[in-house]
Amino acid sequence: MGDHQPTVYEWAGGEEAWHRLTEVFYKKVVEDDLLKPLFEHMQPDHPKHVAMMLGEVFGGPPVYTEEFGGYPRLVRRHRNRDIQPAQRARWVELMLESADETGLPQDAEFRAAFVSYLEFGSRRAMANSAPGAVPGERETLKLWGWGEARPGGE
């Protein structure tokens, strides 16, 4: 492996791992009483788009930005949905449950990076979903790396 430090995207298993995660996750979401109202009109390709977005956030190819416009589109998708704190927390809970079920890495370093983004991203989505919210002017997705916990515990 040499001096190459894998991205969180690579460590998770690349494109296939993120697609597997979102497929399992969104099957749960549409059956969940708390989240179903937010997703009952979801397009069939929504899990694929979220996999692309997560992949890009965690260091994968920028396909979400190139194909869909990146952060501005992400914000538009959440505008005026009025996500409630309990829904946000349930979203994170089901995402973590799906990560376990689909075999995403269990090491502390990966989980620290993954959970920290889920918390950050879901809280930003909730804030941007509030009626009348004025999102920031960011043009790009917030990229997420290892933070303080690097792979290998170093």
Image (cartoon, rainbow, N blue to C red):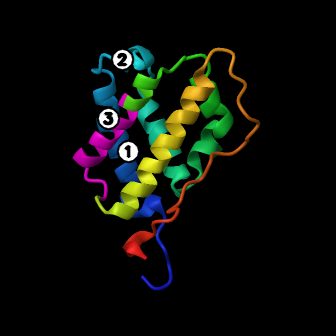
Q: Residue furthest left?
A: 101
Q: Is residue 48 visible?
A: yes
* Mark 1 surroundings within 10 Å by alpha-carbon count, few (fewer than 14), some (14 through 19), many (20 or more): many
Q: Residue furthest right?
A: 137
Q: Earlier in the sequence, mark 1 or mark 2?
A: 1
Q: Which residue is mark 2?
A: 36
**1 and 3 marks in contact (CB < 8 Å):** no
Check disc 2 and give the amino acid type: Lys
Which quadrant of the rendered structure holds the N terminus? bottom left
Mark sitting on residue 94: 3
The residue mark sitting in front, 1 or 2, is: 2
Q: What residue is rendered at 41% in x and 70% in y?
A: 151
**In front of the other: 123 or 75:** 123
Check disc 1 and give the amino acid type: His
Q: Which residue is mark 1?
A: 19
Q: Earlier in the sequence, mark 2 or mark 3?
A: 2
Could you tell me how far apart the alpha carbons at marks 2 and 3 are, in whole angstroms? Answer: 12 Å
